[in-house]
Amino acid sequence: MIRSPFVSLVVLGIAATTLTAQDTREPEQRVEFRADVLPALERSGCSAAACHGGATGRGGFKLSLFGSDPDADYRAIAEEALGRRIDVADPSASLLLRKPTKRYEHGGGRVLQQGDHAYEVLRQWIARGAPPPDTARSAAIADLRLRLQCADDGALSATAFVQGQERDVTRLAHVFTSNDAAVEVHDVDGRTTVRVVEPGEHWVFVRYQGAVARARVVQPFGPTSPTSDPGVNDPEADDTSVSCAAARVDAAWASSLGQLGLVAGPRADGATWMRRVAADLALRTPTQEELAIANDPQRRLEWSDRILRSEVFRDVMIDLWVRAFELDSETGLPEVAARSVRNLRAALRAEANHIDSLRDVVESVLTDPRLSQIVDRAPDPRDRAEFVSRSLLGIGVACARCHDHPNDRWRRREHLEFSACFVDSDRGSGRLYDGYRDPVEPRLLPLRGAAKTPDASGLRASIVRFVLEDGFEDACRLWCHRVFARLFGRGLFSPVDDQRWTNPARLGAVLDVLTSDMIEHEGRLDRPFRVLVASELYALRSEDESLARDEVAYFARRAVRILDARQRLEVAAGALDLPRPRPDATGSALRDELDARRGAAMWRLVTEPGNFIDVLLLTSELESEGEARVEAKRALATRLFVRVLGREPTVRELSLIEPSVAGDVRDGLREIAFALLSCREFGVLR
């Protein structure tokens, strides 16, 4: 339920930690190191990377990043430096309190005030004798759940749940936002509030003991419109047809715009829509014959369906996997590694006709000897684990290699255990060891509930089941987002494969609908393409971002999409009926861009034997004389113009290109084609 200008959603995070059931407003009752002291230090910024939580600490005092290692932090606070940082006899005289209150020289300035909540938590803990972390209590706690709520007046309330007990941790949780310039956070008299100062959709996050929760806050751009949950009470909600799925996408999109007080722009005309589809799905421009159906919506959809069943569309889908598996560039690689990338890229493309679903992809890259080197080319099992979680699930666990993830729930131990699933017995010892030189037992990531132990006799088969069962929703969501980014030129969040809890999607409801639909269709890779192409969202007319910044940012208008050098070359080849140029020769986006700017690659296409220009000349009627010959040349130039730009030339444009075919027709048509393929209009999808 949207409550302008503040909106709250209940969100859960998971972490293993110690927590008591008492309210933090009464710290004198019972203060614990894990549940109170470490969160107080984190909220004050003491354990941040810029302060004592950095790799080398600050001023000879080092804490773990955001309190991720309680035992090490206790030793640093209570035992190091001969215990001089705390004074049990006179807690207020402890260096731990004197320095952050600026009663003693402190490089970090004043971060605590005497009498405030964090100060009292630290003082009470020291007064109790600075007890160490309660490991017995911690071991008994399986998980922590965290909820964040935002009231109408902007007041934040963070509640932690452990084993049926709940506790208000608002004054202990660390608060941060998705956009500090748009959302202000205020702490006054123990009350935390947020104020939205810029219209739009924003997010407020709280972190407590490794768990992260979030709340969505919205300040509309204008009057809001009634919204409904897409698919709820919809008589066609169970219809699995593409048109009904597209309608649900559009309902989610309209609902999001209504909450923001934005109005969707007009549709693009039929010819513009066809040019988008042809470039996005077939890497070409529509033919003059195809453009004849531009004003017939039903026939346009039938035409797009034929493209979605074509071989070149399979190539487009495989291209997304080439990028996802980091096989699209050889820049900076040694020759041996570059050759390996080329071979793997060719092997993946060779499998295009056998890859229809997520299951096909996952099984191929994890178990097929021809493609498993996509994962196994990394010699370190930790790199393999990070690659699989990132490329197949959109989960970034790399930060947890060194410390508990600061903006996600992944723990260092979980990273190690998942990495142990990728140990190759023919490399090294066949085991992975932790920092204490103890062997690490393989365990899968706890995506849905507790972490599972894989079958030791079939680790790869266990990983396949893990991705296709526990991780199936994440994998589908990631693929849907990659498809969205491909069709719209930008994603709903950035980077495209970063599905962190603290990196929410801009049109989250749309992505939810696409994901649910793909799951219902057993992970078919073409499904999100079909649904999006049939939607009103895809058919929006584009707008220059400088003229409609907010509307473009929230997809009330489409952004003008500029093709990069490689895409432009591919579409140009398709427009001239030539085979798709492969980037294998260079594997460098920079080289492609420089080549495009010089025009050499485009000129090679227009002079390639057997291209569309040669076909035009073979079917022309240039044998006639006089006015009939001039008319035939004009017709050839017009057909070439329509093929490249997807529209008829204006009278002025025709007068400009006619002189080019006054002499040698072939050379003239090549000059016209080169000019059209190099112009701004060709390189922009509107």
Image (cartoon, rainbow, N blue to C red):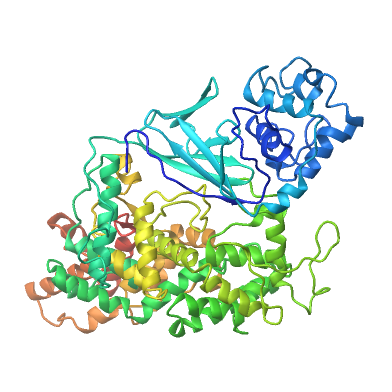
Residue at the image point whose x is 40% and y is 59% from the top: 485
Residue at the image point whose x is 34% and y is 66% from the top: 280
**Residue 436 percent location from the top left of the image:** 85, 57
Q: Quadrant of residue 417?
A: bottom right
Q: Quadrant of the C terminus?
A: bottom left
Q: Residue furthest top?
A: 103
Q: Residue furthest left?
A: 627
**Residue 200 percent location from the top left of the image:** 36, 38
Q: How many marks?
A: 0
**Residue 563 percent location from the top left of the image:** 38, 58
Question: Is 581 placed left or right of 612 in the picture?
Answer: right
Asked whether residue 346 appears in the rendered view, the answer is no
Q: Quadrant of the N terminus?
A: top left
Q: Quadrant of residue 684?
A: bottom left
**Residue 309 percent location from the top left of the image:** 32, 80
Asked whether residue 22 appears in the rendered view, the answer is yes
Question: Is 675 placed left or right of 143 in the picture?
Answer: left
| Camera-side residue of 530 and 170 | 170
Q: Is residue 446 placed above or below 199 in the rendered structure? A: below
| Camera-side residue of 686 and 183 | 183
Residue at the image point whose x is 20% and y is 69% from the top: 637
| Camera-side residue of 526 and 89 | 89
Q: Is residue 180 placed above or below 212 in the rendered structure? A: above
Residue at the image point whose x is 52% and y is 67% from the top: 471
